[in-house]
Structure formats: structure tokens, C-alpha cells
Image (cartoon, helix red, strand yellow):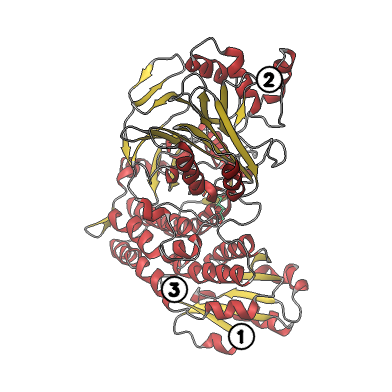
Amino acid sequence: MCGIVGYTGSSSAVPVLLSGLKRLEYRGYDSAGIAVNTGGSLQMVKASGHLEHLMERLKSTPLSGTSGIGHTRWATHGAPTDINAHPHMSNDGQFAVVHNGIIENYAQLREELTENGFQFSSETDTEVIVHLLEYYDQGDPKVAVMKAASRLEGSYALGVVCARFPDTLYTARLSSPLILGVGIGESFFASDVTALVRHTKNVIYMEDGEFACITPRGIEVFDSTGAPIRKTVSRVAWDVEAAEKGGYDHFMLKEIMEQPRALKLTIEPRIRDGRIVLDEFESFRAQLPNIRKVVITACGSAYHAGCVGRYVIEQLCRIPVEAELASELRYRNPIIDSSTLLIVVSQSGETADTIAALKECKARGATVLAVVNVVGSTIAKLADYVLYTWAGPEIAVATTKGYTTQVAVLDLFAVWAAEALGTISAQSCADYVKQLLSLPERAQRAIDLNPGIPALARQYKAADAMFFIGRNIDYAICLEGSLKLKEISYIHSEAYAAGELKHGTIALIDEGRLVVALACQEALFDKMMSNVREVKARGAQVLAAALEGNRRILSQADDVLYIPDTDPLFLAIPEIIPLQLFAYYMARENGCDIDKPKNLAKSVTVE
Ligand code: F6R
């Protein structure tokens, strides 16, 4: 969602801020703006729409200065207009602020500040912050920031500039990501590491309730009493190329193609001498027999990864497993106690509903294991244990390598736990480990086996609606295949458990309707073929997915995607890849903005 960035150093601030904002574009936004300290006074330029509009405006109103703050806004309070765009400035022109998050008590604060004579110019919740800064300003901006923050309820990552202190930036964090960048003679802040790696790989992850004063000479972090905190400087493991397109037309295509490597990085280090070792979770091994139930919770594609995980963990560990949308779980008064293992899945680690569900279940005594991609994210911090997916930065809004690496970690967990619980034999364990190690290669084979996908997309591009059907894990993959298609191509699609067709949906199957039938679970192949015959009999066109070498499918389906032969439990990884490619090329054929689909944000930090 929104992105913030700040710079102080000896270079001109505007290009640094703009390049940071460019890297945050993927999070989704509808307006942008920057404020620069021009040596004792603050000036800002804002524009609704794409960053290009802001850049155009900066040509006619150039800002010169070596420190400043920038923002990409995803409208929540007030329309995406120039006035509502951040930064917001105080009435006396001393402070400008950029903010990610939501101020829940903004209405009361607005009333109070209005009574005290402050003039509001926007409809945003953020504007209360900058007037609070002026209200509490008694000379030291650090104190004003702390006092203002103490009045705020909700979530925030704040970046503040003060006209009187031209080379200093001030930041504060509560439930919204904030990372500081440590350079040589320059310092930065941003809501996301991707905005920093071009300049520095040395970063400080801010925690909730912390504040910082940032100058070119260094960074001071302190707590809510003003006492200094010693923070560790971490080194970002990936470099700038990882956050660039590298010759592909879209980040999404690049990230699809990166999956074999991302899977290798996620799986291989966790297999030693033929055994799965989950370093970060090994200390829990002895407590596993006390677990009576596993609950997997997440949103969107991460939830779909959880749906796959449910089949695999239940099958191998013989423990009841529930997969539930975090937005439902959080309000359901669930039966969860200290015998529950809660697995929270999130690429960003910042999804608001997932965080709320985690907190709710933790309060009821569950042990929380997070499967997260972004190091140092809120979910990683709140969980008792973290298993990172080593997917690298995922920029396209539609997740691809994020999802497959989540599935890989859940698969690893399932085999590891089954071995620990003794629910699989040593021989089966060794066989599963071999299968897991071969997944990166199978992912590559899934790409190589299906060079005809762009042509299929040309053939089917005019489809206005379609159905994905499958059984068992194939059904869990349908959920993700269907979401991928609709979110980037805007073609209506629905995922159905194939056995449910007759209970209603078949009424929608008519002449020419495209049905994507996933038939890779050999044990259920004949059942799927009956479903395929049913929809064909009503005039549907069928694009099937079947295992490489399966010739029986040819007599039933109009077109076939081939999936490398894989243990049925681990099929999700190779099977989703052709569906990701199909969604990508369908969107491309329809001229859609693939990396930034309309109305969607990469990191959904509000409910
Ligand atoms: C779809 C997609 C979303 C996310 C969901 C959860 O392509 O990316 O459905 O999966 O918003 O996000 P994370 O995994 O960051 O919690």
C-alpha cells in the first residue's frame, strides 16, 4: 500500500527520493509527493496519479535541497487528489510529514485541533499528525514527534522534516514497517528495503514504539521515554539486480522464471545428510506430540498455499489441520488453546488481517510459527518461530515465487513433523526428501514443457468468464490459478471442487465456456474425466492439466498443459507454474497493467 522514503546527505534529495518512490510503486498507489528542506524552509510538490505526473510537476517547480521525504499514497481517507496526497505541512510551515498506516482516532484529534485554531486543508487522517507536531513544538522536533506520537491510535510509520533543522529527519513506528538505511555521509529511511538497496545494504529494522533522528553523520534510535537504544545494523542479503526486471517485460514474468532458483534457495539449505533440519524450529521438535490441531491462517494466495499445506500436513502427520482465511478467523471466536500450532503464512509479513488473527490466536495460547518472506517484518517479529521463504524481493503485485516458496516450506514442515512424530517410515521420509530436493528441477521442467502457453492465450483471450475445477490438491491449486487469472487479466473466473459442479455451477456451463480442468491426481483421474465429459456435453471448451506422458487426456480435452510427474502430495509447485504463465499471457493479450493491477496493492496493511 502506501510507501515512504527519506534522504539526508550531500546529494540532491529529489532524484534519490524519486528513485526510492519508483521502487515502491509496486506496492500500489494513486498519488505521490515529496517535500524538501531547501535550507531553512520546506517546499513540497504533490500530484495525483502516476509518479510521472509528479516528475512533470517537478520540472516546472524544481526543488533543491539535500534532505527530504517522499510518499506514494493509496487512498483510504479522502479521494486520491493532489491535496490529499502526502506530504502534509503544518500551518506555520515548520513541519512536513509522510505517513503509512491509519490513525484511528483522527476524527477526535481533528476536532480538538480545529478548536485550537488549526486549519485543515485535506480529508486525510494523516494531517492531524502535522498539526500535532506544530502544537507540541517547543524547540526540539524530537520531543514534538514523541508527544504527537503519544496521541496517535492506530498504525504508523512516520517520516518528518522540520524547516529549522535542514539536515535532520525524524521517524517513528507503530505496526507499520520502517527501515533505516546507513550510508557513508548519508542516511535514509523507507517502508521497504527495495527503496534502499540501490544506496546501501546496511539497514536498521525499527521496532514498534521506537523513534529515530537521522542525519548524514549517523542515526540515533530511542524509545518512548527518549532513552537511546543500541540497534543492530543488518546486511540485506540480496542486491539491486534482484529488485530490477533483468530484461523481462514485467516483474511478474521475471518472478515466474525465478521460481526454480527461489525454490532451491528455500529447500536445499534445510536438507542435510538426507534429513530435513528446520534450524529455526528444531527446539520445538520435542513438543510436537503435544499438538492436537494445526491451524493455518493467511490471506489471498498465502491462504491458498495454506490450503495445499492442509492436505500435505494432514496426510503425512495424521493431525487435524484447518486452513482458514485470517479475515474470518479473527472474528470467529475460534477453539484454539495451547495444544494448537498456528501456522501464519505471509509473503510481506505485514498483512493487517493476518497480523490480527495471529494476535488473537496467540492470546488464546497457540504456538505461532510464521512462514514469511520479508525479513524483520511484523509477522516475523510477533511469531514464536519463523521459517523464512528465501524467495528474494517480490515486486509484481500478483504473487508467484512468494506462493510456491510458501508451499515448499509447508511441504518441508510436513515431512519434518511426520518424521518427528513417527507417522512415516524412515524409507518414506527418505523418498519424500528426494522428491522435495527435485522440486526446483520440476519447476523448471513445468516451464519447459509448456512453450505453447502464449498461443493458448491468443486463442482464449476473448473469454469473459471461466471455471477452474479439480479435486483434492488439484482443487487447492484451482483456487490459486483462478485468483492469478482474475487479478491480473480482470477476466471473471471461479474455482470449484469438481465434485461440486452438479450442485449448482453446471448451470453456468454453456456453449464455448472455458473450463480449466486440473487432472494431475492420478488416483482421481477417472473422476475428473467424468466431470470433463459432463462439461463437454454442455458445450464447454476444456483446457486440462495432466501429468507428462498422460495420453488418455487427449481424447477428452481441447488443449492440455503438461506437468512433470511428481509425488501427488507435492504437485502444487510444478502445477501452478503453467497456470501462472497462462494468467500472465492472458493479461498481456488483453493489454492489462500486469505488474500493477487496478485496485490492488502488494502489501495490504489495512483491514
Ligand atoms: C495475490 C496476492 C495476494 C496476497 C495476499 C496476502 O497474488 O498476492 O492475494 O497473497 O494479499 O499477502 P501476504 O502474503 O503478503 O500476507
Q: Amino acid at mark 3?
A: Ile
**Quadrant for the N terminus in the image:** top right
Q: Amino acid at mark 2?
A: Leu
Q: Which residue in the protein does label 1 denote? A: 558
Residues packed near mark 1 inside 10 Å, few (<14), some (14 to 19) or many (20 plus): some
Of 487 and 434, nearer the camera is: 487
Q: Which residue in the protein does label 3 denote? A: 447
Q: Which residue in the protein does label 2 denote? A: 109
Q: Amino acid at mark 1?
A: Asp
Between discs 2 and 3, the one toward the N terminus = 2
Of 551 and 211, nearer the camera is: 211
* Position of 216 relative to 278 (above/below): above
Q: Is the C-beta of the residue carrying label 2 under 8 Å from the nearest atom of ligand 1?
A: no
Mark 2 or mark 3, whichever is nearer to me? 2
- In percent of width and height, residue 143 lies at 49, 14
Mark 1 or mark 3, whichever is nearer to me? 3
- In percent of width and height, residue 12 lies at 44, 37
- In percent of width and height, residue 112 lies at 71, 15
Residue 377: image tag: none
Real-space Cα distance between discs 2 and 3? 55 Å
* Secondary structure found at label 2: helix
